[in-house]
Every structure is written in structure tokens, then in C-alpha cells.
Image (spheres, rainbow, N blue to C red):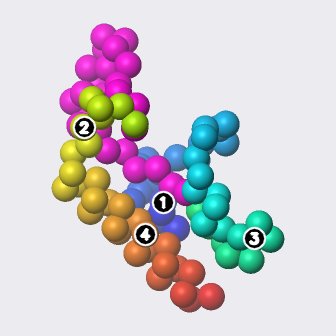
Amino acid sequence: MWKKQFGTENVEATDPTMGGEDFSEYSLPDHSIPAVNFHIGAVDPVKIADSKKNGTPLPSLHSSKFAPVAEPTIRIGMIGMTSAVLELMKK
């Protein structure tokens, strides 16, 4: 669904991680409320290119130096969430 919305080249599935996130608490233990956690690229593409070129790591999400580009990040997040809800409401 997100590949259709954003283009295949802009969506990737990632392997599960052992990150310490409490998001799973929004879903009930019996999984009667489905939940999904999706990540949105929020960093300026120029900073990403510089990081790849120089090998300098980007600040992590909880770093005081993390600086997302607000407008496209919020816009894409809202489109992604709205698309998911509209797709689920068809069922």
C-alpha cells in the first residue's frame, strides 16, 4: 500500500531490531488491536549524502543534535497514516 502511494523506490522493509521501544504497548497483548510501527526519513538529503561520503554518523532519533526537516516529514507521515487508515477501512 505504501509502495503504491510513495513509489517502490521510496519504501523499504527492514529487519526487526532489538530497539527499546514501548510502541507495542498500544496493541493489546492478545493482538486484538492490530498495530504497525513505521519509520519516516526525516533528515535533510544533503546531510545523508555528506554522511555517506564522509563516514560521519548522523545523529540518532533521541539525540539533541537530531534535526528533522519538519514540513516534508510531517506531510509524508500524515499521507502515510491516512493512506493506511483508508486502506484498512475498505476491509
Q: Earlier in the sequence, mark 3 or mark 1?
A: 1
Q: Residue at horizontal 43%, vertical 47%?
A: 9
Question: Measured from the top left, where is residue 78 in percent x and y?
Answer: 34, 67
Label 2 and label 3: CA atoms lie apart by 34 Å
Of the pair 31 and 42, the residue shown nearer to us = 31
Question: Measured from the top left, where is residue 40 in percent x and y?
Answer: 40, 50
Please state if 34 lies on the left or on the right of 88 as rendered.
Answer: right
Q: Which residues are magenta?
A: 37-61
Q: Earlier in the sequence, mark 3 or mark 4?
A: 3
From the image, tell me which residue sits under label 4: 81
Please state if 89 lies on the left or on the right of 17 as rendered.
Answer: left
From the image, tell me which residue sits under label 1: 3
Please tell me in which quadrant of the rendered image residue 24 appears.
bottom right
Label 4 and label 1: CA atoms lie apart by 13 Å
Q: Earlier in the sequence, mark 4 or mark 1?
A: 1
Label 3 and label 4: CA atoms lie apart by 20 Å
Residue 1 against residue 48 in the figure, above or below: below
From the image, tell me which residue sits under label 2: 67
Q: Is residue 69 visible?
A: yes
Q: Which mark is residue 45?
A: none
Please state if 65 lies on the left or on the right of 62 as rendered.
Answer: left
Q: Earlier in the sequence, mark 1 or mark 2?
A: 1
From the image, tell me which residue sits under label 3: 31
Q: Foreground mark, 4 or 2? A: 2
Q: Residue at horizontal 43%, vertical 74%?
A: 83
Residue type at tag 3 = His
| Residue, far bottom | 90
